[in-house]
Amino acid sequence: MHRRFTQHILQLAGSLQHQPAACLLDLQLRDLARQGLLTGHRHYQTGLQEVEPWPYAASVIEEAATPPSSWYTSPAVLEAELSTVFQKSWLLMGESNKLQQPGDFISSLVTGRPFVACVDQHGQLQAYHNVCRHHAAAVCDEPHGNATQFACPYHGWTYGLDGRLQKATKLKGIKNFKASEMGLLPVPIDTWQGFAFMQPGKQRTTSLTEWLGKGGDAMKAADISLANMKHVKTQTYQINCNWKVFCDNYLDGGYHVPHAHKGLASGLHLDSYTSSLYERASIQSCAPQQASAEADQRLGKQSAEYAFVYPNLMLNRYGPWLDINIVEPTGPQTCQVRFEYFLHRDHKAEEEFVQESLQASDAVQQEDVRLCEAVQRGLRSPAYDTGRYAPSVERPMFHFHQLLHKDLLL
């Protein structure tokens, strides 16, 4: 095995001597992985599926190449992400202001899986897999409301707000059954700035406060909060690209804005664009053009703040608006992005302003959809494997890739 490995390295040396230095190691490792020479190495496997190596996680951005295209096309990578990245992360579930009194509940799909959160009879916040323990139907099919219990609409199994099974009929003769072991399966839940977050994994890996780290304080300072905000609209986009392509597009430090979003760019002072990195978050800031600040109420007079919370949440604060973007994979090369638009309660907005703002936002999103789908087609091409970063602007993207690498490969 070692002799074969050495011979292969020598063969590679001649073919790679003219490659850029930053890509040399990457190409070597990727070729060895394809030949099956690195399949036993623990750093290139997750629990069930193999992930193609990315050797730049510990590099400086100036020397790094982007992750291999297989990270954006492979079903095995998506399966690994669902079992690692999305299992151990704190994910947005909904608005915590809908969880105030005993019996209040919200339910939602998170990465395609159903969950329900409620305030129990003791005033404690609880969250569960929204899955009946009988035959897997959802026990709650309303998005929010107030209830004293959750009754499965399929066969009537009924659960208390504490998750315990309270009633199940037609079980005469059943063996090896304990009602105490058949309650709804709980998941960790916590709140921050009016948002309810949950962690799908069986055990809490870290607190929400620790997860957000100093990024949480920075987002508070940027007035990213649901306090004094009212919900205006939900808009969903089905996009033919890997979910990470959408994140990468968001995290390029405004690099694409003057080229792809000329309408948006006209209202921003792009030379003021800055990015700040935190433990599992990043914030990109950009001031409005002074000449347009008075005219463009949508963008406002203060800097627009674009916050990303790993792995899939974007929080955008500009003018009187806060819009939330949640991107979730629907397949290896498809994703869904849900936009939730909130407007400050004190803003005396006329309907014309609201509709014009929503239309302007949709125009930007349609431009991004075209970009992301074009990138996905390029990622499938044999002409592309890895790319490079623009160090002056794309540090948030590189940070995102480093966090992914840590979850996937450790």
Image (tube, grey):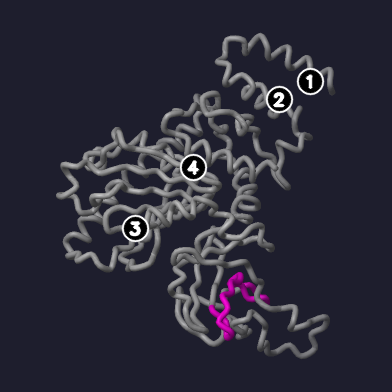
User: In front: mark 3 or mark 2?
Assistant: 3
Whether pointer 1 and pointer 2 mark residues with C-beta atoms closer than 8 Å, the reply is yes
Query: With 158 as the anchor, is 97 left or right in this view?
Result: left
Quadrant housing the N terminus? top right
Residue 285: horizontal and vertical position, in percent? 36, 44
User: In front: mark 2 or mark 4?
Assistant: 4
Numbered badge on residue 322: 3
Dot 1 amino acid type:
Phe
Residue 122: horizontal and vertical position, in percent? 59, 84
Magenta span of residues: 119-136
Gap in angstroms between the C-alphas marked 1 and 3: 54 Å
Q: What residue is shown at x 16% (from left), y 50% (from top)?
A: 294
Residue denoted by label 2: 32
Q: Quadrant of residue 340?
A: bottom left
Residue denoted by label 4: 277
- Badge 3 element: strand
Marks 1 and 2, the one that precedes in the sequence: 1
Whether pointer 4 and pointer 3 mark residues with C-beta atoms closer than 8 Å, the reply is no
